[in-house]
Image: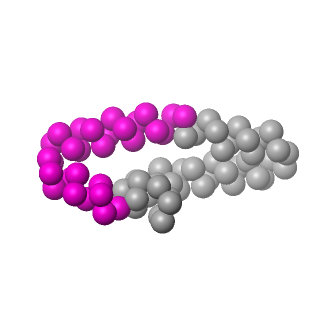
Amino acid sequence: MRHPSYTGLLLIALGVGFGAGNWLSLVISAVLPPLGLLPRIAVEESEMSQALGEQYRSYQRTTHRLVPGLW
């Protein structure tokens, strides 16, 4: 997994949504954090790719971004 801290942040947000006890909180907690993190991840990965070149691109091909086994 390339971004374990972001995965943890998303899980925490989902936990807050579940803890609030209503479906609207869960939906908001599941939708808003990724909207902020995905552009940030794209920028970070672009910078890493420029700085480290083919070595980082090779690493990207062999590891998942946020969810092991899925994405």
- Magenta region includes residue 37: yes
Magenta residues (range): 35-63
Residue 11: x and y, percent? 60, 55
Q: Residue at x 71, y 38 (%)?
A: 28
Viewer-proximal residue among 31 and 10 = 31
Say above or below: 35 vs 67: above
Q: Which quarter of the picture shows residue 50?
A: top left
- Magenta region includes residue 19: no
Residue 3 placement, left or right of 9: left
Say above or below: 38 vs 11: above
Q: Residue at x 50, y 60 (%)?
A: 70
Say above or below: 49 vs 61: above
Q: Which quarter of the picture shows residue 29?
A: top right
Quadrant of the image containing the N terminus: bottom left
Q: Residue at x 31, y 63 (%)?
A: 62
Q: Residue at x 62, y 35 (%)?
A: 32
Residue 57: x and y, percent? 22, 51
